[in-house]
């Protein structure tokens, strides 16, 4: 039972609990008040009746004393008949001292049978008072209460002696009726009070439970909608008000935490999908968007152009100006690209200086080329980085979906291959992908991988092309020209594999090998008595950028014991211009070692000749294209003449390369060119053949 009540209390609503509590409290209070009041009323009524009866009995005893003394029951009865005015007196009797009835009176209408004295006859012993006489002295003033009557006996005293007893039997029914009606009224009041309490408690619980229900409703709404910006207006400053404050505070805290969480998630999302440096989409996001664009294009029968853009000479900028400038450049490049592209197109950074772009709904390959040209044009304006103006170009590869490939990897590979073609074709240009490029592309990758082991597998060899003094016809030096004896592809010329070696980084091992082999050979000729024969070694742009090129040269000289003045390094003009500061410093160090520096392919590079002053150069090698054309084009002849004159004025030696005809030789001699090199006199040959030539010369 206890458990049932407890379960009821726990599970019922606050509203019901409050109502029950108020009703219970009120019920207990009202009921106890009613009981107390009723009992008090009963006690007071009975007390009053007793007092009345006692005084009536006393008056009666006084009035009947003489009748009793004189044994005159008639007179006593007359006296007692006056009791008829007292409607509540049912009967009265006078007892002799022996307990017998002296005289009795019964009210009109009262049934003696219903009285405790069934036979109120003179001489009879009243019922219920068997010991009245014996105990009369002790039981004076005693009341015997029956269910409907009360019986009071009082002694009749004369001169201090008890001469008899007077008894009164009074009716209690009126009293009881009065009490009952009082109780009824009280109960009605109780009922009304209970009803009033119920309604009051309803209002009370409304005042208490309404805000709680409102709060619980707000909680439910928050948990359903997950909208933590909701706030509740507190109803007052009581405990429920504090609960509201706490709830609002909690929501505020959750909201703030959610905000932080959201920011973190956004940041993570950004990290996962965007390049931190440029804020452009990264590879993952690019692929995702491209996939969507491809699906859309398939549905709408459209084309998508994918462009792969790589900055030219970006490594130089990073190496010479530092990575922070390089980063700034990448940011500015990204900004410019985003400016010219439409919103529906995506520009992404794959990493390093590589960017990818896709253009949706491109109508033709020409339009894709126009976009590429627009991107190239962006780079015509110099970039301003840390106060310096920097010109940079880029190379772009273009491929089309679905024509070139129907998958993302294929498209990216095609665009990459086309970009490499653009680079190979002189940079600062774009190329549209075609399947022929792919074949070359895969060749390129395979060759690059073979090239890594070419030095170790001793697949490289050097040929030497002699340089002749125009006047004496003697060999004054040789140029080391590398060949790669590929096990499957045969002899591969340097033009094909040197750029690959530069890209993959195997150029350093190759340069080191060339320097050591060439110096070793030169030392052999030197030791064989051909003392003045110099050895020219071609140094690639990438190798020059590496600070350790000096160490490499020193090591080769130390390894072979070749006098430094017999070693000549051939560099191209562009290498000096591109690497301005670093190249100048490197060349000075090399020069200090006693090595000669020659500018190879002179005339094809930059129009500015100012660098000739700045760099410690010993000789210029006139590019073979001028030599070949000088007898056909007066312009080319003019250039050759000008180069020779300028070189002489700068105290530089002039070497003409690619001399194939006697006519060319004669012209060069006339112009005052000291040294010539070309197929006319000797193709690049092996060391033994050079030996033979040296012996003859
Ligand atoms: P280069 O330094 O200008 O070398 C001269 C190139 O012209 C050589 O081609 C040579 O064989 C060729 N040549 C010489 N005389 C004539 C001629 O009369 N007619 C014609 N048609 N060609 C002639 P090769 O050996 O194929 O070398 C090409 C380029 O490869 C070289 O140009 C040089 O820049 C680079 N190279 C060669 N060997 C090395 C090397 O060991 N290291 C590096 N980094 N580059 C090298
Ligand atoms: Mg050369
Ligand atoms: Mg050359």
Image: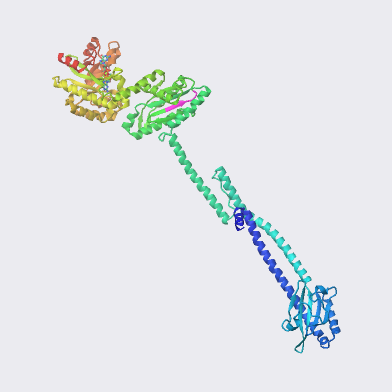
The quarter of the picture where residue 146 lies is bottom right
The quadrant of the picture showing ligand 3 is top left
Query: In the image, which residues are magenta?
Result: 356-361
Q: Residue at x 47, y 39 (%)?
A: 266
Quick check: 561 left or right of 291?
left
412 vs 683: above or below = below
Quick check: 25 left or right of 141?
left
The quarter of the picture where residue 662 lies is top left
Q: Main secondary structure of the magenta part?
A: strand
Residue 34 percent coordinates (x, y): 70, 66
Residue 110 percent coordinates (x, y): 83, 73
Q: Does residue 360 belong to the magenta stretch?
A: yes
Quick check: 232 left or right of 445?
right
Q: Residue at x 15, y 13 (%)?
A: 696
* Residue 674 visible to an observer of this rendering: no
Residue 92 percent coordinates (x, y): 81, 79
* Residue 46 visible to an observer of this rendering: yes
Residue 383 percent coordinates (x, y): 38, 30
The quarter of the picture where residue 640 lies is top left
Quick check: 651 left or right of 108?
left
Which quadrant is the N terminus positioned in? bottom right
Residue in the foreground of this view, choosing between 152 and 527: 152
Q: Does residue 197 belong to the magenta stretch?
A: no
445 vs 63: above or below = above
272 vs 696: above or below = below
Residue in the foreground of this view, choosing between 138 and 402: 138
Extreme bottom residue here? 159
238 vs 104: above or below = above
Residue in the foreground of this view, choosing between 40 and 140: 140
């Amino acid at each position: 039972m206890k458990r049932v009540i407890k379960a009821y209390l726990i599970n019922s609503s606050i509203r019901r609990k409050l109502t029950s509590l108020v009703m219970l409290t009120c019920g207990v209070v009202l009921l106890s008040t009613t009981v107390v009041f009723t009992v008090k009323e009963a006690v007071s009524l009975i007390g009053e009746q007793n007092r009345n009866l006692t005084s009536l009995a006393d008056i009666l005893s006084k009035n009947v004393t003489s009748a009793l003394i004189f044994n005159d029951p008639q007179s006593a009865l007359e006296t007692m008949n006056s009791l008829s005015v007292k409607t509540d007196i049912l009967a009265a009797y006078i007892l002799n001292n022996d307990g017998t009835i002296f005289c009795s009176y019964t009210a009109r209408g009262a049934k003696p049978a219903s009285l405790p004295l069934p036979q109120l006859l003179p001489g009879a012993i009243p019922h219920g008072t068997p010991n009245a006489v014996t105990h009369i002295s002790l039981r004076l003033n005693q009341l015997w209460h029956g269910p409907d009557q009360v019986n009071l006996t009082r002694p009749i005293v004369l001169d201090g002696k008890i001469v008899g007893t007077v008894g009164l039997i009074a009716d209690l029914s009126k009293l009881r009726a009065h009490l009952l009606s009082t109780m009824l009224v009280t109960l009605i009041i109780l009922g009304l009070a209970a009803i009033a309490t119920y309604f009051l408690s309803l209002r009370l619980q409304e005042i208490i439970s309404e805000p709680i229900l409102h709060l619980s409703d707000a909680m439910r709404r928050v948990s359903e909608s997950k909208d933590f910006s909701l706030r509740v207006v507190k109803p007052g400053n009581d405990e429920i008000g504090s609960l509201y404050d706490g709830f609002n505070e909690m929501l505020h805290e959750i909201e703030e935490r959610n905000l932080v969480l959201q920011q973190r998630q956004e940041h993570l999302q950004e990290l996962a999908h965007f390049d931190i440096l440029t804020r452009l989409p990264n590879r993952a996001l690019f692929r995702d968007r491209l996939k969507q664009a491809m699906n859309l294009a398939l549905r709408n029968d459209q084309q998508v152009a994918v462009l792969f853009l790589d900055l030219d000479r970006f490594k130089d900028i990073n190496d010479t100006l530092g990575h922070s400038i390089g980063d700034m450049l990448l940011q500015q490049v990204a900004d410019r690209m985003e400016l010219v592209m439409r919103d529906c197109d995506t520009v992404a950074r794959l990493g390093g200086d590589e960017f990818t772009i896709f253009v949706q709904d491109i109508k033709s390959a020409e339009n894709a080329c126009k976009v590429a040209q627009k991107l190239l044009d962006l780079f015509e304006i110099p970039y301003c980085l840390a106060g310096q103006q920097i010109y940079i170009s880029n190379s772009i590869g273009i491929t089309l979906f679905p024509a070139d490939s129907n998958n993302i990897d294929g498209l990216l590979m095609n665009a990459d291959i086309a970009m490499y073609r653009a680079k190979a074709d002189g940079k600062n240009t774009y190329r549209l992908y075609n399947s022929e490029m792919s074949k070359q592309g895969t060749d390129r990758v395979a060759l690059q991988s073979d090239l890594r082991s070419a030095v170790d597998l001793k697949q490289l060899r050097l040929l030497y092309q002699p340089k002749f003094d125009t006047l004496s016809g003697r060999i004054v030096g040789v140029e080391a020209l590398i060949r790669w004896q590929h096990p499957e592809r045969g002899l591969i010329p340097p033009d094909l594999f040197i750029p690959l070696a530069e890209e993959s980084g195997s150029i350093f091992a190759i340069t080191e090998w060339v320097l050591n082999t060439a110096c070793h050979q030169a030392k052999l000729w030197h030791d064989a008595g051909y003392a003045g024969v110099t050895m020219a070694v071609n140094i690639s742009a990438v190798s020059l950028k590496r600070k350790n090129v000096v160490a490499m040269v020193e090591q080769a000289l130390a390894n072979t014991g070749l006098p430094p003045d017999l070693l000549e390094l051939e560099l191209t003009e562009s290498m000096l211009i591109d690497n301005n500061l670093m190249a100048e410093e490197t060349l000075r160090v090399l020069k200090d070692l006693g090595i000669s520096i020659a500018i190879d392919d002179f005339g094809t590079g930059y129009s500015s000749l100012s660098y000739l002053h700045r760099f410690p150069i010993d000789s210029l090698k006139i590019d073979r294209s001028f030599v070949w054309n000088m007898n056909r084009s007066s312009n080319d002849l003019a250039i050759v003449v000008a180069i020779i004159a300028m070189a002489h004025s700068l105290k530089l030696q002039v070497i003409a390369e690619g001399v194939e005809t006697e006519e060319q030789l004669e012209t060069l001699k006339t112009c005052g060119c000291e040294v010539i090199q070309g197929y006319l006199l000797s193709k690049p040959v092996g060391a033994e053949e050079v030996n033979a030539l040296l012996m003859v010369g």
